[in-house]
């Protein structure tokens, strides 16, 4: 057996006679016949699991890539087929079996041509499509989080439910992203090229995956008490409530796993809609459960006051939502023509062994999730210790609430753009040994990955920093003034790290596209080590400062790794315009900071118009019920600040010469039939 090597160590494939445009492109035999799919999500964002999408990974070959430099001058094939139609015709060729080899090659060529051309032309449209599903899911998720805060508060009861309801996500990220998607699920696409369409193979694969998921779910549910005692720091009634929630929430592992398997089968068959929108139903069911709870029992913020009926309604509706989410994938899967019959046995069916890259990826996942679990343990310690002392501080509920707000702009802007960019990044890496392009395309993709998301992330992060307080008061309307301030400061620190968080996302994509598992592992270790250090430091500082220290770990960890990655990428692929990128960051950052000051002044100006009684309630109110007047004034202040920011950023970005910003904004203004900025 040959020793595994990093991708750049592989020998180049030599051009063969009759291979037009062939060059020294690295190509493994297995890759040519077996295009695979790779999933991508942030390792340290388990809440984003339900929005993970499968990204087609196209392995470049000059015979299949008409956009390659050696083929760009040539006319396209006489009868190009659409991607979906080509996929269908390819399946028909398999079923008929007449001239399958050559016809499958032609079908594969048309598929790659269509995908590559569409990716190049429609990056913005693809990002918008992804952002639309993300927007609906995130908005409903914030409604869900807001109602949870109204029911549970931010102290021990809230930490108990958040911990029990989040732990299945940590487990599923390991199981799904580490095993199902990195090792098993990509095999579905490969199997579809077999004479039987991969039916026997996929049946065995799905059977094994479902058995594995069910076994993990049973073990985790049976050991729920042990898991909660290991990964939280609650005690007394808080721990008892956490364990009760966990026994009902832990079966979510089963439903999340089924959702992952069925969703990835749909993706492998070219059906993406249901997988992207099913999480909406999950949020609807969970919100309905919270509304019923509020109607029956109102707010219950004391851990000792919870009854079995309350626990079942809250935790049961959360688990039911995940079950509905998984069940919604069955009808479209059936309509796609997929039929499953349990088949047992894996040996001799081409499953192979766990690859080196998949092993390193899984190890990186374990390290990242371990850091996340430590954060949960420290944050719940803050809640439990504060409760014992009779004080209220920012704890795990505050952390989750701030993270939900942080994730909204990050998911809409950064994840949507980078997810759409990822297939092109992978193809650019595969073209790196073409003498006509070399690493030029790779440098271009890295430059775009560092530039395009930043044009939105930098202004939005400054906007959230300036208007963090109204954002928290409007979304989490049940919080008191003190609780809102406890959530606002962690949110500000998180938003300060939004750009570096985005660059680290690109770093993971870069390593996935180039299959640099070892590089991704040591970079993940660096990030987690810094975050763990700050989490442990939170034990030593006053309780009221503990959560801010944890969030500072997020800031310094991501900032450090972002710098390391940019220097590493420049060393590996050459200069991709890092100086100009940093210059754009600086100019847009200054323009955004000035605009943020304008937004904050506008917000404060509105609050100055409030009647004295409402102003006192806004600043010092400790009422635990919804105050419509306070909420309305915060909303008006936030709107005024947002409008002021938009006007200011258009002016300051022009003054500071951020041309790239208007290259992004003007097409949006044109679509809205608004005047463009020249």
Image: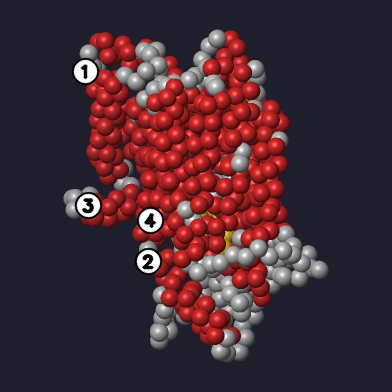
Residue count near mark 4 (Cα–Cα under 10 Å), binned few <14, some 14–19, many ≥20: some
Q: Residue at x 66, y 30 (%)?
A: 228
Query: Of helix, strand and loop, which one carries label 1?
Result: loop
Of circles 4 and 3, the one toward us is: 4
Residue count near mark 3 (Cα–Cα under 10 Å), binned few <14, some 14–19, many ≥20: few
Q: Which mark is residue 90?
A: none
Residue count near mark 1 (Cα–Cα under 10 Å), binned few <14, some 14–19, many ≥20: few
Q: Residue at x 33, y 32 (%)?
A: 596
Residue count near mark 2 (Cα–Cα under 10 Å), binned few <14, some 14–19, many ≥20: few
Distance from label 1 to label 2 (Cα)? Answer: 50 Å
**241 w.r.t. 500: above or below:** above
Q: Is residue 447 visible?
A: no
Q: Answer with mark 2 or mark 3, whichever residue precedes in sequence.
A: 2
Query: Of helix, strand and loop, which one carries label 2?
Result: helix
Distance from label 4 to label 1 (Cα)? Answer: 41 Å
Which residue was labeled with disc 1? 609
Q: Answer with mark 4 or mark 1, whichever residue precedes in sequence.
A: 4
Query: Is mark 2 in CB contact (under 8 Å) with mark 4?
Result: no
Which residue was labeled with disc 3? 672
> Residue 551 at x, y = what percent?
54, 30
> Residue 158 at x, y = what percent?
52, 25
Distance from label 2 to label 3 (Cα)? Answer: 21 Å
**3 w.r.t. 559: above or below:** below
Which residue was labeled with disc 4? 129
Q: The N terminus appears in which quarter of the rendering?
A: bottom right
Of circles 4 and 1, the one toward us is: 4
Q: Answer with mark 2 or mark 4, whichever residue precedes in sequence.
A: 2
């Amino acid at each position: 057996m040959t020793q595994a090597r990093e991708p750049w160590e592989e020998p180049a494939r030599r051009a063969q006679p009759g291979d037009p445009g062939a060059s020294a492109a690295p190509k493994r035999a297995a890759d040519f016949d077996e295009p695979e799919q790779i999933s991508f999500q942030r390792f340290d964002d388990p809440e984003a699991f339900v929005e993970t999408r499968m990204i087609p990974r196209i392995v470049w070959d000059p015979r299949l890539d008409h956009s390659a430099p050696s083929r760009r001058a040539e006319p396209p094939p006489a009868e190009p087929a659409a991607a979906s139609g080509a996929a269908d015709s390819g399946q028909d060729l398999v079923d008929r079996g007449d001239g399958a080899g050559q016809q499958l090659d032609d079908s594969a060529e048309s598929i790659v041509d269509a995908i590559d051309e569409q990716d190049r032309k429609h990056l913005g449209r693809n990002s918008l499509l992804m952002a639309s599903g993300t927007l609906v899911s995130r908005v409903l998720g914030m409604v869900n989080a807001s109602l949870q805060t109204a029911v549970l508060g931010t102290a021990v009861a809230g930490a108990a439910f958040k911990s029990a309801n989040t732990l299945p996500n940590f487990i599923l990220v390991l199981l799904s992203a580490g095993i199902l998607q990195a090792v098993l699920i990509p095999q579905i696409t490969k199997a579809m090229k077999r004479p039987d369409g991969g039916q026997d193979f996929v049946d065995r694969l799905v059977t094994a995956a479902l058995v594995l998921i069910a076994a993990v779910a049973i073990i985790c549910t049976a050991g729920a008490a042990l898991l909660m005692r290991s990964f939280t720091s609650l005690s007394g009634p808080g721990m008892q409530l956490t364990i009760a929630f966990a026994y009902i929430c832990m079966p979510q592992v089963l439903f999340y796993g089924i959702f992952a398997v069925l969703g990835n089968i749909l993706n492998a068959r070219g059906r993406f809609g249901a997988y992207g929108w099913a999480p909406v139903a999950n949020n609807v069911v969970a919100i309905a459960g919270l509304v019923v709870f509020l109607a029956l029992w109102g707010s219950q913020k004391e851990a000792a006051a919870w009854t079995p009926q309350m626990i079942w309604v809250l935790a049961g509706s959360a688990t039911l939502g995940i079950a509905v989410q998984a069940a919604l994938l069955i009808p479209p899967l059936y309509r796609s023509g997929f039929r499953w019959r349990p088949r047992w046995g894996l040996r001799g069916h081409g499953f192979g062994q766990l690859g080196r890259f998949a092993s390193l990826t899984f190890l990186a996942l374990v390290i990242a999730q371990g850091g996340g679990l430590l954060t949960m343990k420290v944050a719940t310690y803050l809640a439990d210790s504060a409760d014992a002392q009779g004080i209220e501080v920012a704890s795990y509920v505050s952390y989750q609430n701030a993270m939900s707000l942080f994730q909204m702009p990050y998911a809409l802007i950064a994840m949507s753009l980078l997810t759409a960019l990822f297939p092109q990044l992978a193809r650019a890496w595969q073209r790196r040994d073409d003498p006509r392009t070399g690493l030029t395309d790779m440098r271009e993709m890295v430059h775009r990955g560092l530039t395009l998301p930043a044009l939105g992330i930098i202004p939005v992060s400054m906007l959230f920093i300036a208007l963090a307080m109204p954002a928290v008061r409007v979304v989490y309307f049940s919080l008191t003034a003190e609780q809102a301030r406890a959530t606002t400061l962690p949110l500000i620190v998180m938003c300060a790290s939004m750009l570096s968080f985005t660059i680290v996302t690109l770093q993971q994509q870069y390593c996935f596209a180039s299959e640099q598992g070892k590089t991704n592992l040591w970079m993940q270790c660096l990030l987690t080590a810094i975050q763990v250090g700050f989490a442990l430091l939170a034990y030593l500082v006053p309780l009221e400062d503990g959560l801010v220290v944890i969030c500072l770990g997020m800031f310094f960890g991501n900032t450090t790794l972002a710098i390391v990655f940019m220097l590493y990428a420049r060393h590996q692929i050459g200069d991709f315009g890092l100086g100009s990128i940093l210059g754009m960051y600086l100019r847009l950052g200054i323009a955004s900071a000035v605009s943020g000051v304008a937004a904050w002044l506008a917000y404060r100006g509105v609050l100055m118009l409030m009647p004295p009684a409402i102003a006192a309630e806004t600043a010092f109110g400790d009422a635990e019920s919804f105050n419509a007047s306070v909420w309305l004034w915060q909303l008006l202040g936030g709107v005024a600040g947002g409008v002021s920011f938009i006007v200011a950023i258009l002016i300051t970005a022009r003054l500071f010469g951020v041309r790239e910003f208007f290259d992004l904004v003007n097409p949006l203004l044109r679509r809205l039939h608004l005047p463009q900025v020249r």
